[in-house]
Structure formats: C-alpha cells, structure tokens
Amino acid sequence: MAYSIYEIKGLFSMDRYARQIVLDEIGEDGQEKLLRAKVLCVGAGGLGSSILLYLAAAGVGTIGVADFDNVEECNLQRQILYDTNQIGSNKASNAKKRLKELNPNITVNIYPNGLTDKNVEELFTAYDIIIDGTDNFETKFLINDAGVKFKKPVIYGAIQGFEGQVSVFDSNLGACYRCLYPESLKHLSVNCEQGGVIGTVAGIIGTVQAMQAIMLIIAHESFEPLIGKLWIIDAKTMQTRLLDIPKDQNCPVCS
C-alpha cells in the first residue's frame, strides 16, 4: 500500500528521520521514496551487517535478507548484527529481529535458504535494488546475471585484508560484474576465512554500499552513484582510488 508523506506522518514518528529530512538533498520527498523502496541484501555477514543496519535506520520501507548461514563465533569480529548468544542460529532470522528492534516501522522479509538458481527470479522481481554482500564468485555471478536479466541495479562490494571495493552495476547504463571479473578469474577468489580481513573494513564497505542504495533510491541531481566506477580503499594508508569500468563488448551476459 502506498502512503503519502502526510499519511506517513500520521502513521509513524517522523522525528526518527528528522536529521536526514532536514537535508536539502533528501527532504520529505526523499524520505517518502525511502519508505516506498524495496531493497534485497544477499548475504547478512560482514558487509550485510552494516548495509542492513543503516538501511533500516534510514527508513527503507521493505528490506529482504537472504542468507542460509548460521552465526559462528569467528563471525563476531566483524558481523555486528549478532551477539554471542546467537551462535549456531540462522543469520537471516537474527537479522530480522535486530532490524525490527532498530526500526519497527519497516518490513523485513527473510530468506533463510539464501539465494539460489531456484528462487532468484522470485526474489529479484520483488525488489527494486539488489545489494551483493557475498564473498564468493559463484553467488556474485548469479547475482550479476540475474540483475542483467531482470534489469535490476546491483550494488557490489568486496573485502579482503585491509582493502575493500564498491561499484554499482547497471547493465542499462554501463558495465556488469562480468565485465570487471570474467569467469576465468574465479579461481583467484579467496574468502575471509582464507585471506583474512580486519572487521572495520567490512563496516566501511558495507556503509558505502548502503549509501549507494540511498543515492539510487532518492536520485537527487547532485548524487553521483558508482555506476561504471570502481571505488577502492586501502585501510592501511586510507588511500582511495576511483577507476572506470569499461563495458566489455564481448561480455557473454550484458553485451
């Protein structure tokens, strides 16, 4: 059901969002766009923790959480959605509980079996924006290919060690994930268990991904989301780089 901003004021306390509504780039119209938005986050781990918390806090009206994994003790160094008492239980279920505690006004849908080739169409067609919070090539390729097929923007993030990167893949406007990382390179992939990661980098990259989602939703003329760009940070030096991602004219998916 769609609400006007005036109906929203009657239903929910707008004091919650006062500090962002006062921004000219957001305002009441932008807050209404956030409330009406539907965002799916695939992965509720290190990246997903920051992504989900900040989207819920900002008032994104419908958030989907897809993750089949259970909380482990080694997750707690970076996955700030969870606590010690939740070890052994499903991440998506725990994420919903925490997000509803943070903001009871939003809808949180969970998919505790994660994203698979069996449910990808159902999930992608139900949301406006997809955020990739995963750590393996296979799922990233599935997210990318479905994003191209169903014409959904995908907000990509990756972390390893002290480095992280973010991009927005929208095949209608530029390159896709396969233009950046062809499938032939998937053997080079390592996850956090293999390569290690400092927890704060997961927080930085997840927060940037959440900001990209907010920018896409509100679409203010001053916003420049990372479409066709790869933003990279080295947390050891705090140096950042912004690279162009050219569209591969021979890409098997988006071309």
Image: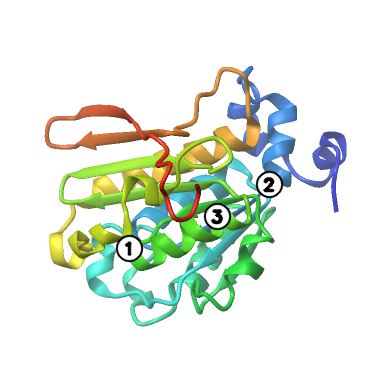
Q: Which mark is residue 37?
A: 2
Q: Disc 3 or 2, which lies upstream in sequence?
A: 2
State the quadrant of the N terminus: bottom right
* Disc 3 from disc 2: Cα separation: 17 Å
Q: Which of 59 and 85 lies nearest the eye of the viewer? A: 59
From what the image shows, is residue 51 above or below residue 26?
below
Q: Residue 215: x percent and y percent?
A: 56, 32
Horizontally, residue 1 falls left or right of residue 28, namely right
Task: Identify the secondary structure beneath mark 3.
Answer: helix
Q: Disc 3 or 1, which lies upstream in sequence?
A: 1
Horizontally, residue 173 falls left or right of residue 199, namely right
* Disc 2 from disc 1: Cα separation: 27 Å
* Label 3 vs label 2, nearer the camera: 3
Asked if disc 3 and disc 2 are in contact, CB closer than 8 Å, the reply is: no
Q: Disc 2 or 1, which lies upstream in sequence?
A: 2
Residue type, numbered disc 1? Phe
Which residue carries the number 1 mark? 137
Q: Which mark is residue 81?
A: none
Q: Answer with the quarter of the image where residue 201 lies.
A: top left
Asked if disc 2 and disc 1 are in contact, CB closer than 8 Å, the reply is: no
From what the image shows, is residue 244 above or below residue 253?
above
Residue furthest bottom in the image: 88
**Which residue is found at the position 18% from the left and 37% from the top?**
235
**Which residue is found at the position 85% from the left and 44% from the top?**
3
* Disc 3 from disc 1: Cα separation: 15 Å
Q: Residue 12: x percent and y percent?
A: 76, 45
Is residue 43 shown to the viewer in this render? no
Horizontally, residue 50 falls left or right of residue 115, namely left
Which residue carries the number 3 mark? 147
